[in-house]
Image: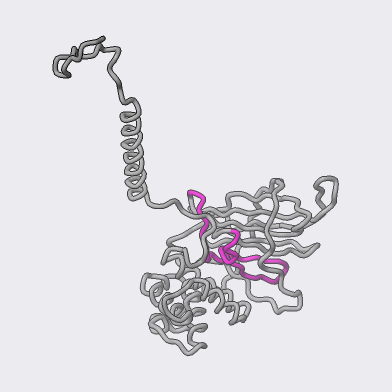
Amino acid sequence: MRPNIPSNLRPAPREGETKVESGYFSQAAFALSLIAGLLLGLSITRIQGPLPRGNAEPWQLRAEDRQHYMIAIALEHENSGDTQRALAKLIALRPLQDPWSALAAGACELGSRGYLRNPSGIRALRSAVSLYTSQGRAGCAEQLLPPEATESADATQAAPAPLAAPVSDESRPTPLPTKRPLRQTFVATPTRHLAAPGADERSFAVLSVRSFCDLARPALIEVHVVDYIGRGIPGQPIRVRWGNQEDLFFSGLKVEYGDSYADFQMAPDIDYAIEMAGARDPSASSLRTGDCYTDNRRGLKSYRITFVET
């Protein structure tokens, strides 16, 4: 029988007999690492800001881009006359006031920031004023506009002969078109060299012109307008010319395809030229659809043009 030895007189356990709570230290280290990672992630997010979204909804645009988007809506309305479509696009911006008053406020803000320093800026702001005043709204933009007689005659000067850009082939699917050619019976408008609103602040160059073959989307001119790091720029006017006619369409109006996107539907046997505001090489010309083949099936050739801000 072992004697009953008081606990205070028992010898200390040998090193091998010492119990170590191995789980405690690993769990504590994991918890500390997790907290440190969360703090590091939050600090990086606060410093660098959120990553940009490629396909933002109109109401998610920055304040300045929303104002340019509203001007693009007014310019489109000037060409189409579709007030309900313009209203729907203004509502999509989720303004804090009624859409027409928001347009008046945006035009006033742009007019106060040097938007009127060039003829196309004056024309764009005049389109916005015409639209919101037709709906019974008023703002400061109408007071900022110069008399029409003082506008520069440069806005009606003929454009220089278009410069052809090299065309390469590619194969990628294309979204639905947003604009179709005007009927040939329309009265021709004077050819003008397009300058974007605020063109003294933004200029563009032709980055690439490529042909592609998509059986589901034939005879399409697809345009992308991006800044120097590839982000889409909404609300930029693009001019298409064919024969003695021309039309305008705008980037970013089909927001489901991104801020950069715009397109135009071609008709057979017609040469088209695409111009962008302030571009050093302002044209991609002689764009004509024709037969193309993919998977041994015949379709109609399309084009993809990219303009980059310089």
**Residue name at image x 52 percent, y 55 percent:** 54
Q: Position of residue 294 (x, y in %)?
A: 80, 47
Q: Nearer the viewer, residue 4 or 101?
A: 4
Vertical order, 179 against 132 (above or below): above
Horizontally, residue 299 falls left or right of residue 87, namely right
State how the image is colored. Answer: one colour
Q: Position of residue 275 (x, y in %)?
A: 60, 61
Specify the quadrant of the image occupied by residue 23: top left
| Residue furthest out toward the bottom | 136
The total number of labels drawn is: 0
Vertical order, 262 against 75 (above or below): above
| Residue furthest out toward the front | 1
Vertical order, 61 against 297 (above or below): below
Q: Nearer the viewer, residue 233 or 158?
A: 233
Q: Position of residue 37 (x, y in %)?
A: 35, 40
Q: Position of residue 10 (x, y in %)?
A: 18, 14
Q: Which residues are magenta?
A: 229-257
**Residue name at image x 48 percent, y 79 percent:** 99
Whether 234 is among the magenta residues is yes
Horizontally, residue 88 falls left or right of residue 133, namely right
| Residue furthest out toward the left | 8
**Residue name at image x 62 percent, y 58 percent:** 223
Q: Nearer the viewer, residue 99 or 19?
A: 19
Whether 263 is among the magenta residues is no
Horizontally, residue 80 falls left or right of residue 218, namely left
